[in-house]
Amino acid sequence: MQERSSVADLANQLRSELDRYSPGGKLPSSRALVDRFRVSPVTVSRALAQLAAEGLVVTRPGAGAFRARPRPSATSGGDTSWQEVALSADGAADLVPRSVDASGVLVSLAAPPPGVIEFNGGYLHPSLQPERAMAAALSRAGRRPGAWGRPPMEGLPELREWFARGIGGAITAAEVLITSGGQSALTTALRALAPPGTPVLVESPTYPGMLAIARAAGLRPVPVPVDADGVRPALLADAFRATGARVFVCQPLFQNPTGAVLAPERRGEVLRIARAAGAFVVEDDFVRRLVHEDAGPLPAPLAADDPDGVVVHVGSLTKATSPSFRVSALAARGPVLERLRAIQVVDTFFVPRPLQEAALELVGSPAWPRHLRAVSAELRARRDAMTSALRLHLPEISLPHIPSGGYHLWPRLPEGTDETALTAAALCAGVAVTPGRPYFSAEPPAPHLRLSFAAVAGTGEIAEGVRRLRTACAEAGGRRG
């Protein structure tokens, strides 16, 4: 984090001094900048690269950095109003909508303004990411013979084997496809399994990105309620009968957002119900590697207990590494595998080979289990810190379930709380939170927030963020005296 700050500070300083040089004029040498600002050569190189990307300087190998010459002024834009007609004409008849609501996804992707504590993030804070291990893995991967060649369309055999071993059961490497991140894998699965215009069963509440995928594919998400033990089998059976759906999407382990784990006695029931309906279960196993230190043994993926090809399994490395380390896997048995493979090839060709090679280097290194142990301990400490702070400062907020894995809590707000007003007040108070409404495909039963404890710098920031949230609750009228 200090290096990132130094790069930004140096870039800002150099940017403010550019007027000292005429266009084409040479800036001080890298060595002079190192001596003057007492920073590393790497910091100087990155700061100059940032200014070059902004078009403010030009770097010439062996010659140095020079102030860029002014670019010609932009001509006035044309008239794009014709696009409103082209993009909306006859849209009412489209099975697959041409406009997509990505707001639920952007909440967890957009970086908050400076100084705002990030309780809405969906990824590990940089201090928790295995940055050195990933950099070393990428460096080693780049030197592997053939690393920059075209990989097999299904993915590298060794990486497919690694994912297959992680799933367990009778799943083999031949039944695994390497994909570019879990979101891409889920998109491929829904396109393969459900034609536009049909219903798809989803947990309620569920990940907004899943709802966005379904709606973008022209599908109709139908909610099936979740409780502390996961999806409710009786209601799942009712939903299959009522809708004729052929797909159910679920997160059996540390469900997003509730954190629930599908109870042992429900696992077989879910598979039996889906099999009787002639339906597939898409298992989004997104945070298996973000288990907390006190969780105990984890249940196997549903796919490990499925001999009949009911389950299409999605697993990913992204959540446990970095948002940019987009390597995941789709696993399926039977004829559906060929359909998944065809859609994957048409949409993306393949995952870049250097990234697949880097994934192999990372998970095969001694740094990988050390990283997972460190994250496991840190997530438990952060979860406990957030839970304690909420109970101390906001006792009126209910915490019906404390998860033993994942990266967030799902507190229930007092009846009558306006989520939108509270979210806005929280941002004004300096903490970004996620409202519960986007997690429901129908009317929500109660107001909620999703609070992430993984995207912040540490437990001190968690305590401060909860204090700011308390202020926001008072200002929004969410507190009950």
Image (cartoon, rainbow, N blue to C red):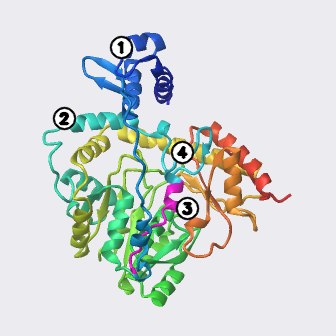
Element carrying mark 1: loop
| Residue 475 rendering spot, x and y as whole percentages | 79, 52
Do the residues bearing badges 3 and 1 touch, measured as CB atoms within 8 Å? Answer: no
Is 450 on the left-hand or right-hand side of 285?
right
Sooner in the amino-acid sequence: mark 3 or mark 2: 2
Q: Label 1, label 4: how many angstroms apart (C-alpha)?
A: 37 Å
Q: Label 4, label 3: how many angstroms apart (C-alpha)?
A: 15 Å
Residue 143, which numbered label? 2
Q: Label 3, label 2: how many angstroms apart (C-alpha)?
A: 41 Å
Q: Amino acid at mark 3?
A: Pro
Do the residues bearing badges 4 and 2 touch, measured as CB atoms within 8 Å? Answer: no
Locate residue 370: give its quadrant: top left
Q: Amino acid at mark 4?
A: Ala
The residue identified by callout 1 is 29
Question: Where is 289 relative to 131, above or below?
Answer: below
The residue identified by callout 4 is 455
Residue 406 appears in the figure: no
Is 309 on the left-hand or right-hand side of 294?
left
Question: Where is 214 relative to 209, above or below?
Answer: below
Q: Is residue 222 magenta?
A: no
Sooner in the amino-acid sequence: mark 2 or mark 1: 1
Sooner in the amino-acid sequence: mark 4 or mark 3: 3
Locate residue 81: give its quadrant: bottom left
Sooner in the amino-acid sequence: mark 3 or mark 1: 1
The residue identified by callout 3 is 257
**Disc 4 packing (10 Å; few <14; some 14–19; many ≥20):** many
